[in-house]
Image: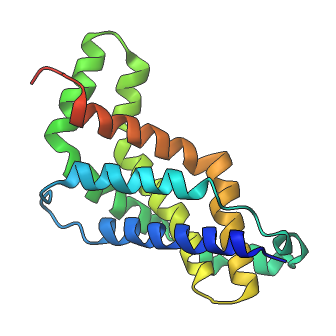
Amino acid sequence: MASAKNDSALKKFYGVAVEYCDFVDGLKSWRPRHFYLNLQSLLAKLLYTILFVQIDEFYYRLPNEKTNDEKYNAKHSDYKRTAKKMERMFLKDLHRVVQYHKENKDEEAAYRASIVSNDLAELYQDVRKGIVAFEEASKEGRAVASWEWRFNYEIHWGEHLLRAITTVYEILYDPLPD
């Protein structure tokens, strides 16, 4: 049975996940004012709120067809569209960060920065899966959402989140030459 504490954590994370996805969905072909500050805030909120989410034990009693339902998976074309949209937002600033790292022979940091749009698209896809499950408003849907968010944070999208936070931080605060 899900505890009231975990139910509250799920609701909070759901709210932040929707806020992040709405932010990405709302991006147009130009970068909005305060883009980096808003993105940094959302990424930090995702990181903070996921720490309180636990996998609902009920998840492990669900039949396979409930836990592997295709309706939770996004299309690859959606991923590509999201990655392209994020790429447009970073154009000049990202080039500056990548070049800085290459000039300083830090290929790992250059690579990390160069894939930020892919990291943000992966993050979007992964939290979107849990949103779809959570919005079913059923015990099963919440259990699947808890697993999608927490388990996949630990094994997959947490790394995308941390790399993106680092790159956004560099763009905002590191004294890189123009």
| Residue in view at x 24 percent, y 50 percent | 37
Q: Position of residue 133 (x, y in %)?
A: 62, 79
From the viewer's perspective, is 174 left or right of 22? Answer: left
Residue farthest to the front, as pictured: 5
Callout count: 0
Residue 80, compared with residue 60, is above or below; it is above
| Residue in view at x 67 percent, y 48 percent | 154
Q: Is residue 6 visible?
A: yes
Residue 9, located in which quarter of the rendered image?
A: bottom right
Residue 20, compared with residue 72, is above or below; it is above
| Residue in view at x 38 percent, y 70 percent | 19
As rendered, which of 63 and 79 lies closer to the eye? 63
As rendered, which of 11 and 118 lies closer to the eye? 11
Quadrant in which the C terminus appears: top left
Quadrant in which the N terminus appears: bottom right
Residue farthest to the left, as pictured: 178
Residue farthest to the bottom, as pictured: 137
From the viewer's perspective, is 110 left or right of 124? Answer: left
Q: Position of residue 81 (x, y in %)?
A: 34, 63
Residue farthest to the right, as pictured: 61
Q: Position of residue 6 (x, y in %)?
A: 70, 69
Residue 71, located in which quarter of the rendered image?
A: bottom right
Q: How is the image coloured?
A: rainbow
Q: Is residue 73 visible?
A: no
Residue 18, located in which quarter of the rendered image?
A: bottom left
| Residue in view at x 30 percent, y 18 percent | 101
Q: Position of residue 33 (x, y in %)?
A: 12, 57
